[in-house]
Structures are given as structure tokens and as C-alpha cells.
């Protein structure tokens, strides 16, 4: 892991950009921490630059609560190289959406599974590197979308002990099977009127998770309209499980 | 309203039993309040004595947050007279449940609508009496089941400005129409695996509410297994809207 920039934000947060191999990311830590901090991995739908305002807002909340926070770019987003297969399935998706046709399992699988297959090992490699830093301890939480990435990470990565998952993207059938393997506490956010979300699919996925403690918080509004109080409740979920 | 008993509980809560006409109830207020307190009406499925441990726990939370809290007995529960019609429909319900037959709309209507028709005016009369007390101000919240009672109260009683509703009982189709008239902020609790609850019906009712701010919190466990953190989130909802 190579740090490529470092700046101290005005509320005493240390923001460092890094790369791990070809994966760029950002790490936020308390500027004046003493003990190693628990860590929240901040997931997002891709495009670090575009997402930055929302990511930094979430990171500020996390750091204010005594956590370190980190995010990485998704495969094929931002400045990372596009794959021909990913470009093709996006074109297929846009075509069926424009035509008002149903989004087939084949499109969802081709859209999401390669992303999950590539992103999850990247998150785990970044986790290795982050936990080797003296200022970061554990435990570790995952927060965010893509919900299929969060689901597989929650199922396979034993260092992640709690997750806040954002419903709101296509979920392959294979991920429902992986959801049954998840046992860590989950806090699932669902925007009830999300125009980009299949509500019934989100409820079915919530039902599929194997965790004994799982909570669904559904709120009104569209994809980006998560109310402030819902964000605060997600923070309290992490405070309960990571401290 | 006649107070018939008064005791000071160990954490400086004043507990007073009262009657209003033939309706018994309990009022809990801060023992050393200065300003008139906002009020939370605590709903329940009937049977004040049987429910007392859970009611006093909820009342303690409310009073600790600076609220007054009150509850009344439901028609036909506890020491209140049973109606022949209510006894008949309960017998009908138990018969179809034992036989594994579907619970018809007719049974649900006969079970719930007369209860709502009688309980809602009683709650409103108690609200008149409580708000006349100098130690109680407003605004007013309603918390609890029976969700059909809470729905109609939220729809028709303008002094109730926010409600926490517990999914978990039969809901007549007519109440779905009333739900569309509700505009106040709602916080709906759903026990995902509630053996006495029709999950899909609860989700449909949540969808039907007309409120712009409505939140569904679904948690694991059965009818009485609402986790402590879910109760605390409901308290914070009232703190946001009643203070």
C-alpha cells in the first residue's frame, strides 16, 4: 500500500489517498488518535471522484465516532480500466431498460457477478494492508452498496463483524444463496420508493440473510434520499457492534 | 377523570390510576416536573394487569425522556364488560385457526372494527382530560398496538402529531383506506418472524400510509421479542417529533 497524498481536514481528520497495486483508495483516520481505531469500510456504487461529497460526509461521521474509514475504487469505475464484457452488458442493460423490457437473470449475472468476483478480493487485500497500520485496529464493519459485494464480504471475510447494507441494485440469484451463509449482525437500509430498486427483491434478500440479528430500516424517498436520522441509526448500529 | 390511586415509584415517577367514566387507565408523570410535559399515549393489545410489566417499562423510558405517559384499558379486556358479539367472533376466530382455515375478512371486520369504533373515542376523551391537567402540555404521540386503533387515531385526532405503530394484529380492509388519510410522521415496528402476524399485510399497510415521513423498522424474533435497541430508536423518533 502506497500513500500518494495526505491532507489534514479542518475537523482534525487525516485524509490519505493510497494505491494498492492498481486499486486507488482513500483512508480517513482521526488526526489525533491514541489507541488503534476500529475500521469501517465504505462501499459505494463506483466513481470515487463523483461520489466524494457523499463519501467524505459518511467518513466524517465515522471518524467523529472514533472509527477509521476507508474506501476503494470499484473495478471498471473512475480511472480504472473498463472491460469489454462490462461495457457490453451495460449496453445490453440500457437497451432493455429503454425498450421497457424485463432485466433478465442473464443480464444481472453478467453485470454484477464479475464485479463481485473482482471487488471482494480487492477489499480483502486492502483490509490486510489497513490492519497492518499501527493506527488501525479492529473490529471491522462494512457499510454501503453494492449490496452483492457487501453480502459476499459478510459471508466470506471473518474480520468483518457487522455490516450496514444499502438495498438498491440488481442482485444475482447466486448472491441469495450466499446471503444464507451470512451470520454477522446486519443493518439493511431500504429506500421504499427507490426508482432504481426492486422493493420485493430487497425484502426477499433481507429475508434470506442467515443472521440472527438483522434489522431492516425502510424510509421514504428515492435512491439518494436516505434521511439524516437513518444515517445516525446506522452509526449507532456500528457503535453497538464495533466498540 | 377521577384519580383512584397514587404512588411514587423509586425512580421519581408519579403513577396514578384513574377512571374516566367506565374506562380505567394509568398516568405516569415525572415526579418533579416543572414545565408541562409532552404526552405519549401507550397502546397495547388489552389487559392492563397482564400487560403491566411491559407497560411500566415503556412508561419508564418515556418519563426518563421528559414525557408524560398514559394508557387505558381496551373495551372488553381486563375488568371491562365483554360484549356477546365480541365473544362470538373470538370463538369463530379460534375455531378457524384450530381448523387451519383462512381467517376471512368477515371475521377480521367483526373482530377489529367494533373495537376501533369504541376505543378511538375513548382515547380522545382521555386525551381531553389529560391535556386539561396542568402538568401535561403537548404535543402528543401515540405508541403501540392495536395498529388499527393507532391508524384511526393518527387519521382523525389532530392533536396526535407522531405515532409509533406495532404491526402484529389483523387489519380490516377499511383501515387500509383510513391509512391513506394519515399524514403525520410514523415509525412502524415489525417483528419479521412474528408467528401472529401476516408479514405481507404489515408491509402493505406500511405502503398504504399517506405520511411523507414514515419509517419501517423490521427486526428478527417473535411477537414480544422487540430488541432493546429498537425501543430506543422509537424513543428517539418521539424525541425528534415531540420536543
Image (cartoon, coloured by chain):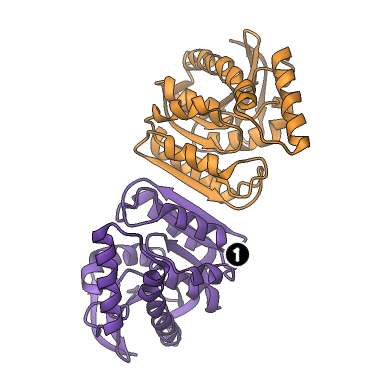
Chain colours: A purple, B orange
Determine the residue located farthest toward the top in the rendered image.
B21
Percent across and percent down for residue A25 are 30, 80
- B239 and B145: which is toward the camera: B145
Compared with B80, A66 (above or below) is below
Percent across and percent down for residue B17 are 65, 19
- B123 and B204: which is toward the camera: B204
Q: Is residue B60 visible?
A: yes
Question: What secondary structure is found at the residue carrying circle 1?
Answer: loop
Percent across and percent down for residue B126 are 54, 15
The answer to which quarter of the image holds residue B4 is top right
Q: Residue at left 52%, top 62%?
A: A186
Q: Residue at left 55%, top 70%?
A: A177
For disc 1, the chain is A
Residue for badge 1:
A210
In this picture, residue A235 sits left or right of residue B25: left
- A209 and B140: which is toward the camera: A209
Compared with B200, A23 (above or below) is below
In this picture, residue A118 sits left or right of residue B192: left
Q: Is residue A68 visible?
A: no
Compared with A216, A23 (above or below) is below
The answer to which quarter of the image holds residue B208 is top left
In this picture, residue B52 sits left or right of residue B236: right
Percent across and percent down for residue B76 are 69, 18
In this picture, residue B135 sits left or right of residue A196: right
- A201 and B216: which is toward the camera: A201
How many numbered markers are drawn?
1
Q: Residue at left 35%, top 73%?
A: A111
Amino acid at each position: 500500500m502506497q500513500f500518494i497524498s495526505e491532507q489534514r481536514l479542518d475537523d482534525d481528520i487525516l485524509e490519505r489517498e493510497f494505491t494498492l497495486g492498481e486499486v486507488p483508495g482513500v483512508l480517513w483516520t482521526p488526526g489525533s488518535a491514541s489507541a488503534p481505531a476500529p475500521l469501517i469500510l465504505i462501499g459505494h456504487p463506483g466513481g470515487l471522484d463523483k461520489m466524494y461529497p457523499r463519501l467524505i460526509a459518511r467518513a466524517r461521521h465515522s471518524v467523529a465516532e472514533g472509527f477509521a474509514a476507508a474506501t476503494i475504487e470499484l473495478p471498471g469505475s473512475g480511472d480504472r480500466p473498463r472491460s469489454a464484457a462490462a461495457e457490453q452488458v451495460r449496453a445490453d442493460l440500457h437497451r432493455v431498460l429503454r425498450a421497457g423490457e424485463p432485466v433478465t437473470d442473464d443480464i444481472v449475472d453478467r453485470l454484477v457477478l464479475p464485479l463481485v468476483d473482482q471487488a471482494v478480493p480487492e477489499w480483502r487485500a486492502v483490509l490486510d494492508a489497513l490492519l497492518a497500520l499501527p493506527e488501525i485496529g479492529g473490529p471491522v464493519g462494512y457499510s454501503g452498496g453494492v449490496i452483492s459485494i457487501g453480502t459476499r464480504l459478510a459471508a466470506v471475510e471473518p474480520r468483518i463483524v457487522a455490516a450496514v447494507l444499502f438495498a438498491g441494485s440488481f442482485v444475482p440469484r447466486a448472491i441469495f444463496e450466499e446471503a444464507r451463509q451470512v451470520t454477522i449482525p446486519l443493518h439493511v437500509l431500504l429506500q421504499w420508493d427507490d426508482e432504481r430498486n426492486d422493493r420485493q427483491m430487497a425484502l426477499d434478500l433481507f429475508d434470506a440473510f442467515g443472521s440472527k440479528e438483522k434489522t431492516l430500516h425502510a424510509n421514504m424517498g428515492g435512491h439518494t434520499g436516505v434521511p439524516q436520522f437513518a444515517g445516525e441509526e446506522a452509526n449507532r448500529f456500528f457503535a453497538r457492534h464495533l466498540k
